[in-house]
Amino acid sequence: MGTQPAALNPFVYSRPLAPQEAINRDEDVAALLDLAEGGHNATLFAPRRFGKTSLLKQLVEAAESRADMLAVLVDFSDALSDADVAARLEYSYRGMQGPVARFIANHLQSVGIGTPAGGLVLQRTPRPEAIAAIHALLELPSELHAREGKRVLVVYDEFQALIALDGMDGVFRSHLQHHGDVASYVFSGSEPSLLRALFEDRARPLFGQAEPTRLSRLPSAATADYVAARFTATGKDAGPALWPLVHAADGHPQRLMLLAHRLWDMTPAQETAELPLLARAYEATMRQVDSEMRGLWEALSPNERRVLLGIASGLSPAQRGMVALTGLRSRSSAQSAADALLGRGVLERRDDTVTIVDPLLERWTRRRPGARPIAYVLPRSNEWVVTDGPSLAFEHSKHEELDAAQRAAQAIVSAGGTGGDVIVYDTEDPNDLPDWAF
């Protein structure tokens, strides 16, 4: 009798996920869909590997299934030329399914765009110049609406790539400004400074043409349900490691998948993931991303590195303590470096503070020389737990007495010689404890 094949790891972290694979982001999808149905355009910013493309796929699916719209997703990542833009548009429209597929093929043939992207078809007429093809392709939403009587949702991913193509945003505006009754547009990107330059600079053709939105972090409850269900479906139990894993990932989609992948891999079949196993999985993940982090760090300017060190230490660029800790010349130097990191999506504004987007980068930076460590003391199960981060995955020790726990925490923050902060939660009232303490 044959053996049962081993379950495959259900946590995929190396590519964008299909809608059925991803965590549902209903609030984000609903907000964008409401704008689209109301005839509004939107810009959507999300840092790289933040689940943006997976969300856009969910949006396209929801537009078709829930709002009875036609929808198309065009990826402009690293678009290099007018011909490249034309090819991206053509490829995406030819990928639409259903009754409109033949109409699109016939329409493109009628305007001289008769060779499918990647295919080979005999053409009797010359293919139009790239810019002429772009103009024809940008009118497809209007043609589709005229045929089907449905509003069209057009989603442009990594739209900021077009800023390098002189005059291209003007070409796009010359069409979309007339499409208010037939189509809605979402312009998505991962570099906020470039995306804002296209839509918030009064000198640009697309100024004021879209409402700015930002992709939020994953909701904790939906994230926990997602992880638990996939452990269970593959014969394992996320157990006590579940919520500490969710808090360690801090709502970052790709980092959640990476940590969950490693934890699932280390959990034996038919067994439960305990906290010590999560700690091992986390450290294995940190080793895995170390070269990535070093590459990012080395690409930063000295002041940008100083700002990252300060923010990882719990400081704000506006604080004098940032300057004193990191050796920056002034608060204006700190703010200038912070603005550059915000513009590239390394930092983000969150709850009126500036934070590091990637939780693994934050922890990696906090471990570097010059950072100011933070230790936490909190009650749990009639003991005092000491951690060096906002998750029980970062547990250092347990103590019967508060004094002993505080001494252990003080030893953590004193080890590097720069001093640090000890945060003590000396209450068991759930209202006074952080979410990650449970």
Image: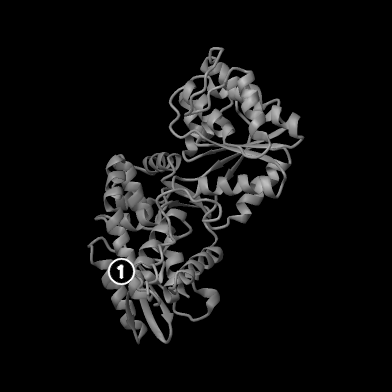
| Residue furthest front as drawn | 1
Which of these two is toward me, 223 or 423?
223
In the picture provided, is 278 more to the left or to the right than 173?
A: left
User: Where's residue 98, x and y in %?
Assistant: 66, 39
Instruction: Identify whether 266 is placed above or below 74.
Output: below
| Residue furthest right as drawn | 149
Q: Quadrant of the N terminus?
A: bottom left
Q: Residue at x 36, y 83 (%)?
A: 402
Q: Residue at x 37, y 78 (%)?
A: 385
| Residue furthest top as drawn | 125
Which of these two is toward me, 418 or 242?
242
User: Where's residue 273, x and y in %?
Assistant: 39, 74
Q: Bin the neighbour count of mark 1 within 10 Å (Cα to Cα): few under 14, some 14-19, many 20 and up.
A: some
Instruction: Identify whether 137 is placed above or below 21.
Output: above
Residue that carries the numbered disc 1 in the rendered image: 280
Instruction: Identify whether 385 is placed above or below 46.
Output: below
Which of these two is toward me, 310 or 291?
291
Q: Secondary structure at mark 1?
A: helix
User: Where's residue 254, x and y in %?
Assistant: 43, 54
